[in-house]
Image (spheres, rainbow, N blue to C red):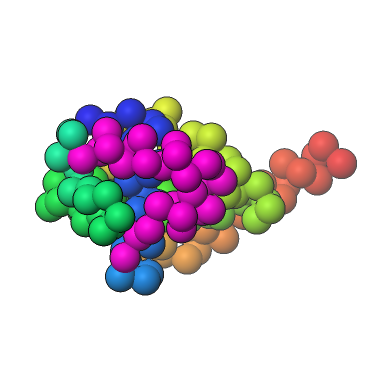
Amino acid sequence: MPTPSMEDYLEQIYKLIDDKGYARVSDIAENLNVHPSSVTKMVQKLDKTKYLIYERYRGLVLTPKGMKIGKRLVDRHSLLEEFLKIIGVNEENIYKDVEGIEHHLSWDAITCIEYLVQYFQEDPSRLEELRKLKELDENKEG
């Protein structure tokens, strides 16, 4: 399995390729807010571990292994965003919270969250019930 840092790069590369059709070192650096030389080092590591194929000055291509992991990471991120929305986390906190927790959850926990999200999405009355509970609790405190 890739390290949390490798995951961040794979997720970003996958998103760039999905959006633009390609991922350049400069785009990755800009999106991750890191120096291009850091991207080059990580891309070389990802090449050695067979997540992508990197040719200097020519760009990079995700391998099937890299594509599979990249998609899984993007899906995990989206699922966690949806989960936090469902449980009522303020919109301005969601991205930062997802970034803070996504690398610290097991895939088992992610699967359980996925079932919970499906549970609430299948029947909107369940979500309404959850929101009422949160509202009642907030009114007790206030």
Number of numbered labels in the structure image:
0
Please tell me whether residue 31 belongs to the stretch shown in magenta: yes
Left or right of 32: which side holds 19?
Answer: left
Up the image or down, 137 lies above or below 19; here it is above
Residue drawn 18% across and 49% down?
A: 53
Left or right of 123: which side holds 45?
Answer: left
The part of the chain drawn in magenta is 22-47
Residue drawn 21% across and 56% down?
A: 61
User: Residue 105 sits in which quadrant?
Assistant: top left
Place of residue 88 in the rendered image (x, y in percent of width and height, measured from the top left)? 62, 51
Overall secondary structure of the magenta stretch? helix
Please tell me whether residue 43 belongs to the stretch shown in magenta: yes
| Closer to us: 114 or 49 | 49
Place of residue 3 in the rendered image (x, y in percent of width and height, measured from the top left)? 33, 29
Left or right of 51: which side holds 118?
Answer: right
Place of residue 113 in the rendered image (x, y in percent of width and height, measured from the top left)? 38, 43
| Closer to us: 55 or 142 | 55
Q: Quadrant of the N terminus?
A: top left
